[in-house]
Image: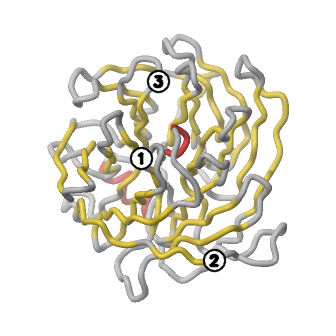
Amino acid sequence: MQRLSARSFAVLTTVGALLLTGCGTEIASPGKTPSSATAGRTIRAQKVMRLTQPHAETAMTLLEGPTFDGNGGLLVVDVTAPGGKPKVIRVDVGRKTSRAVHTDDRGAYTSAQFSPYDGRIYLSDFSHGEIVSLAPDGSDPRTFFSGEIDGARMNPDDIAFDRSGNLYLSDSRGLSEGEALGRVVRIDREGGKATVLAEGLAAPNGISFDSEYRGLWFSELTENRISYLRLDQEGRVTSRHTAIRVNGGIAQTDSIAVDADGNLYQGLHGRAAMAVYDRNGERLATVELPARTEGLESATNVAITPGGTRAYMTVSGPAGGYLYAFDALAAGTRQSNGG
């Protein structure tokens, strides 16, 4: 799920579809981490296809939440798609074709994930504070969770599942006010119990388990930092610390994916690039678009092919919503599915 400049937030408020990211300009470099003397190598991504164009109703398009299903099909969401336009899109990356899976008149979906418990697609509706689920073919929409948690409604952005199917999400509450009211929330797999794991956060966005499911990585959009929550076997927090500070210039930390070796792929809002770190915070690489690419301003998220290394990155801007591909540093797993 990405996310958000004040200008973009105002636009989406006007059309009634708030999201967690927005637009910027491609000028800043993510830079170096304190733990590394080099920003690592550059990985050039290649254009796969354009999926969407800016919508007349919202004046923008924003692709997010890439996730592979069990048959190798790739799903993405268009956060700013108006009612009647595809909000969940299935992509055949081999044939370079796409088709609509789901639309409605209400949701602003910032993330998509398949549950290991029931196999359904789970979507985070940022503007209505809900988690919605669909059958794998996009039918049978259900509200999985809605309402307040500890007296406050959510603005859910990204989703991660543990092995048992319990859902963990970044709640970007406080983003529009510029206040650190965000949370990391756990919802049990039946949707009956919600628990706040961390609070007082600055617009949390990306969230993903590490490769061993020992803890959660999450990013804070307005602080450009990635933190780590160590969890016990019951999903309770045992420790929390700031792990990586991303020197992004005008770019901000968006969604996170993790490969089989535990490397982190950090999306950037405000720059069409991704920063890649190892689990110790060393900057390994920067994923860049080809030189002279114009009209693309944010690389929100990535999904790495399960068991393979081909990665598909969602990139958006005034030129439209695109998929770009690159070779990841290690194979994809469930935690490599965008969120």
Q: Which amino acid type is marked by label 1?
A: Gly
Q: Which label lies toward us, 3 or 1?
A: 3
Q: Residue at x 36, y 21 (%)?
A: 143
Q: Residue at x 35, y 36 (%)?
A: 69
Q: Which amino acid type is marked by label 2?
A: Arg
In this view, the residue farthest toward the front is 307
Q: Which residue is mark 3?
A: 116
Mark 1 residue element: strand
Q: Which residue is mark 2?
A: 41
Q: Residue 332: x, y in percent?
A: 51, 47
Q: Residue at x 74, y 52 (%)?
A: 279
Q: Residue 135: x, y in percent?
A: 28, 24
Q: Are marks 3 and 2 in contact (CB under 8 Å)?
A: no
Mark 3 residue element: loop
Q: Residue at x 75, y 43 (%)?
A: 228
Q: Are marks 3 and 1 in contact (CB under 8 Å)?
A: no
